[in-house]
Amino acid sequence: MSFGQIPYDVAHLLGGGMLLSGFVLLYQRRLAAMTGAFAAQGALLALAVAWQGFIQEEPGLFISALVAAAVKAVLIPLALRAFILRLGLQRRVEPGLGIGASLIAGVALVALACLVVLPATAGAAALLREDLAIALSVVLLGLLMMVTRRHAIGQVVGLLSLENGLVLAASGVQGMPLVVEIATAALVLVLAGVAGFFVLLLRERFESLDLSLLHRHRGEGE
Amino acid sequence: MPDLLIALPFLAALLLALWPSPLLNIAAALAGFLLSLTLLTAPREVEGLLLLDALNLPLVLLSAFIGLTTAIFSAAMLPAEGFSPRAARAYHAAFQAFLGANYLALLADNLGLMWAAIEGATLATVLMVALHRGAAALEAAWKFLILCGVGIALALFGTIVLGLAAQPYTGGGEGALSFTALLRVGREADPALLSLAFIFLLVGYGTKAGLAPLHSWLPDAHAEGPVAMSAVLSGLLLNAALHAILRARAVVALNEAVLPPGALMAGMGLLSLLLAALALWRRRDARRFLAWSSIEHMGLAAFAFGLGGPAALAGVLHMLGHSLVKSALFFLVGRATLLKGSQRLEDLRGLVAGHPGLGWALVLGFLAIAGLPPFSLFSSEFLMIQQSAARLPWLALPLGLGLLVAALALLRAMQALCLGPATPDARPPAPAWGGSWAVLGPAWAHLLAALVLGLALPAPLAALLAEAARIAG
């Protein structure tokens, strides 16, 4: 395989798009719009993985691209949307860290990812290094989203977007066994299912999904 | 043979989802235990995606043993947990699925498969924590899901980077994440990548093993689920996570130029020990108290593996001893909370006077977990201190201090729980399945096993553990 200009540019474009949608997820306050941004990230992920399959000439990656498209771009966003409709959260605006503050923190995390990954991978190919840096940035943005959100659905979307970053990292490494990607996709589905089940339970018990309410029930509180 | 051991619990989980019988649960666990015994004579080699060696063999045997005793205990406790029929199905299926995932996590040669197995085991236990559906149970389960989700994601990133480091040498494919293949190339692989991978793996799996600073899910998860689940969480899941760290460390430590993995592990271990030793003094909830003691002991084991050399033997022995004694304590405290109708330490006083069989077993269990002779935790902690004093004397002081503070807290709790005048019982003991022996029998069996490990280690087992210590560090 060769790293001509085009493979490199397209991989960067797709990875950059994922990073961008990570930032959108970070500041988007309305839950319905957040679902849209998450679906976009999933679709970009599927394209990025398929592109990697194309330049690495690895048919297995097309399968994981298909799985990613089905699970992350279609199934989970649809389920989230159904949830939001069912629980009547369309207009819900979630308080969290301010937009400016979360964007600044996000930029700092991207810088951190580059500082960590680029020196450590000095020996590897340029595409791989930068892909890994982008992937780690997406992971860290997902983490940041989980920290700044108080709404249960926001936290779950953060966790799922963090997994998107992981799949991007795995697809960039040549010869990563398929078992990893299949297992990841399957587990993400289960994770989403379990989280959805909990969201219903939370709703049933507290009639709210604001997790700051939960801290009163720490067991040793009273 | 290992594949059969893994498949059996999953099969049993399916059956139990249809027909939730505690007896079937026990039968499946017993079959698993017998199968695990046949592994003793099986060849120690790679078989497809699985690997059997001296490091995972003792842990598999331990898991099978605790799986069996916990199944018996859980049958006895079942009426008291008060599950709806649907919850009982979920509970039994999740228990067996957890056992299967745990065996897979221990036996996997492929680190990607190991990761998936640990994630699967976590999801099974998350569901069990939420079974009681109270506010505190939901808070515990949510925290467990989110924190462990983050931890496991970081571990996957570490696994990917590890594969990346080895990729120029293994050539990719299914072998890229095989532990045995990684061992062959660890020496040549890029040290910077290996360091990066190990840090992510340590923090990621360390979350699951309950090492500070990402330990905060552990006390709540142990306190809110069914009692039997706390026993397998402490006895099996924490070990599986620590075992994954040991595998990563064995690969990374081959390379001279990497950040010293042992020092990182010892640092996190010591931090967990000191934090837990102080936290033990402020606990009011009996099961959270035991869970904090699990953090302490996982910290100790991580510290021992971090020191490496002869101390790694102490680490292996400590993992075994801690699992046995801690799950026994969870059995006993679970029974006591049932009798007294409360989980608060102050409501559980004077157990020796009220319930001698339970009380005395609890006294012995607390003496064992505090690291007093003749139980095996004494041998392992003694070896740790001795090694630390001989090789890193300036670390022996915080280590000894942490052990002392924790042991005093444990003994204080023992005195309060067991000795002195009894608090009133909430209700007469419920007629449990198999009488009180189904509750106390497993606990005594665990204490006896810990005693044998401490007093008279059989020679073949000693050789096995020494070989395990060589692999681990």
Image (cartoon, coloured by chain):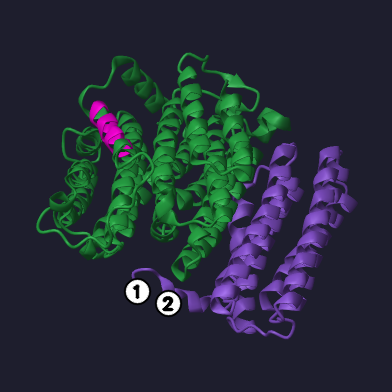
Chain colours: A purple, B green
Amino acid on which the number 2 mark rests in the picture? Arg
Q: Are marks 2 and 1 in contact (CB under 8 Å)?
A: yes
**Which part of the image, by quadrant, shows the C terminus of chain B?**
top left
Q: Residue at x 56, y 53 (%)?
A: B85
Q: Give the range drawn in magenta.
A: B442-452
Residue A5 visible: yes
Q: Is residue B45 above or below residue B204?
A: above
- Tag 2, which secondary structure? helix
Residue depicted at x 16% and y 45% = B356
Q: In this view, does B177 lie to the left or right of B207?
A: right
> Is the same chain shared between marks 2 and 1?
yes
Query: How far across and down, in percent of the image, does residue B250 sit?
Result: 48, 32
Quarter of the figure that contains the N terminus of chain B: top right
Kindly report the distance in space between the C-alpha atoms of the residues bearing marks 2 and 1.
Answer: 7 Å
Give the total number of marks visible in the rendering.
2
The answer to whether residue B159 is left or right of residue A66 is left
Residue B214's quadrant in the figure?
bottom left
Near-viewer residue (B235 or A118): B235
Residue closest to the eye, A16 or B441: B441
The quarter of the displayed image where residue B262 is located: top left
Q: Label 2, on which residue?
A: A216
Displayed quadrant of residue B12: top right
Q: What element carries label 1?
A: loop
Residue B449 magenta: yes
Residue A148 x, y percent position in the rendering: 57, 75
At label 2, counting other C-alpha atoms closer than 10 Å, the crowd grade (few under 14, some 14-19, many 20 or more) is: some
Q: Name the residue under label 1.
A: A221
Q: How crowded is mark 1: few (under 14 residues within 10 Å), some or many (20 or more)?
A: few
Foreground residue among A53 and B227: B227
